[in-house]
Image: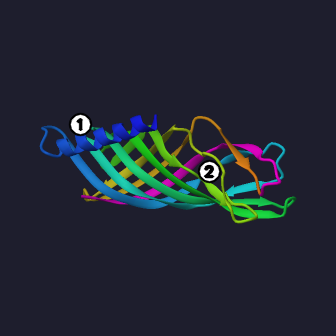
Amino acid sequence: MRRCIVILVALLIGATAYAGGGVPGIRTEWGVVAGVHHPLARFDMGDSSASLKAQTGFVAGIHMGLRLVGILGIQPEILYSYNKIALTDEKQKFKSDIKCNTVQVPLLVSLKAVLVRFNVGPVFTLMDNPTYLDRKGEKVMFGRLYPTVSYSAGVSVCLFNRLLVDARVGGGFKAMENCLSYDISMEGEYIKTTMFNAQLKVGILF
């Protein structure tokens, strides 16, 4: 599945570059974006004594766009986001930060009304490997936060044909199973995480 997604992204980049060579009726745009990434996670802790609190991080990436005839556009992106989830278990006297590094590819349909764009579409997760340190300082995999395919929707404004301001929400269609284990003597405790997020980005278009 991930290999198919990589091929799809490569084809989209190639199509954008080709359209940029002068295909009539199609306008292309490229740019870089960066901003704030705020997780809105829901944790089903079951019988675990731990508590989890997602913290605000950042997001940055590459924006691409094919502006088709009229108000319609296709907007693929490659985004990297980073944030932490504070892990506390008072019963086990344990504290750590779950570090979340995620690479996602939104493939959005964009409808334009004057300066405003309304964007919605699927998001493909290429990398999602949150980890934390156990009592001995060993790196432990927490488990995926996002399914391979999730969604995103939002609104953006393009000013002076160069400055892009984008706000959106996104998340998974299903809960993911994660595991907590603080040292080798402790059996893993399984929890379920349903991940949502809100992003506010500013970009420069070329």
Q: Position of residue 109 (x, y in %)?
A: 36, 37
- Which residues are the magenta region? 183-206
Left or right side of 135 for 116: left
Q: Position of residue 81 (x, y in %)?
A: 49, 56
Binning the other alpha carbons within 10 Å of mark 1 as few (below 14), some (14 to 19) or many (20 upward) gives: few
Q: Position of residue 10 (x, y in %)?
A: 31, 42
Q: Residue furthest right?
A: 91
Q: Residue at x 50, y 54 (%)?
A: 199
Disc number placed over residue 70 in the picture, else none: 1
The answer to which quarter of the image holds residue 192 is top right
Q: How is the image coloured?
A: rainbow
Q: Secondary structure at mark 1?
A: loop
Cα–Cα span, label 1 and label 2: 35 Å
Left or right side of 189 for 60: left
Q: Secondary structure at mark 2?
A: loop
Q: Residue at x 31, y 54 (%)?
A: 158
Mark 2 highlights which residue? 40
Three-letter amino acid code at the position of disc 2 = Leu
